[in-house]
Image (tube, rainbow, N blue to C red):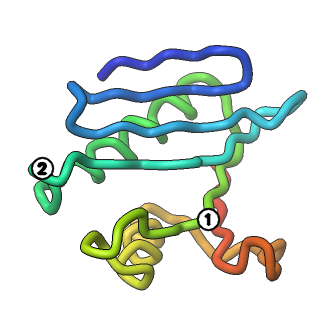
Amino acid sequence: MEITKKNNKIYFNDNDIATANLSIKKGSQAVYLELIKVDKRYRRKKHATKMIYGVLDYLKENSYTYISLSPLPLEADGISLDELISFYEYFGFRRSIDADYTYPYLMEKTL
């Protein structure tokens, strides 16, 4: 897996099959997961699972302490919102008390 850090962003690329983008909260060890995307040809084959494990391992190894995200299906024919929420809950993410009308499904995890 290729990992690139530029300014306040971290990019993950697994052979163009799956990608992830994170934003680093300035002045902290917190990140926001902007996106995990898997090429349509490889969906439902554990590539997103491999990616989230890679992201979480990298964050722990590099002393990040907190990750948040707002689950949002990217495509109408992709995973549903409920499935996406369940996917992240499997990895220990919980609904954030900071969820509001702007980010109604905000989820978080302490590392």
Residue at position x 35%, y 67% in the image: 75
Relative to residue 52, is residue 62 depicted above or below?
above
Proximity of marks 1 and 2: CB atoms separated by less than 8 Å: no
Tell me if residue 51 comes above or below residue 97 in the rendering: above
Label 2 element class: helix
Q: Nearer the viewer, residue 108 or 18?
A: 18
Q: Secondary structure at mark 1?
A: loop
Q: Quadrant of residue 24?
A: top right
Find residue 28 and report its image quarter. top right
Q: Position of residue 22 (x, y in %)?
A: 59, 38
Seen in the picture, residue 108 relative to 35 is either above or below; the reply is below
In this rendering, the answer to whether 45 lies above or below 64 is below
Three-letter amino acid code at the position of disc 1? Ser
Residue 55 horizontal side relative to residue 79, left or right: right
| 44 lies left or right of 97 | left
In percent of the image, x 52 and y 37: which residue is there?
Answer: 21
The amino acid type, in three-letter code, at marker 2 is Tyr
Q: Which residue is mark 2?
A: 42
Q: Quadrant of the N terminus?
A: top left
Q: Which mark is residue 50?
A: none
Q: Position of residue 36 (x, y in %)?
A: 42, 48
Residue in the picture at 26% in, 29% down = 14
Within 10 Å of disc 2 (Cα), the crowding (few <14, some 14-19, many 20+) is few
Q: At which x and y percent is residue 105?
A: 64, 77
Name the image quarter holding residue 76.
bottom left
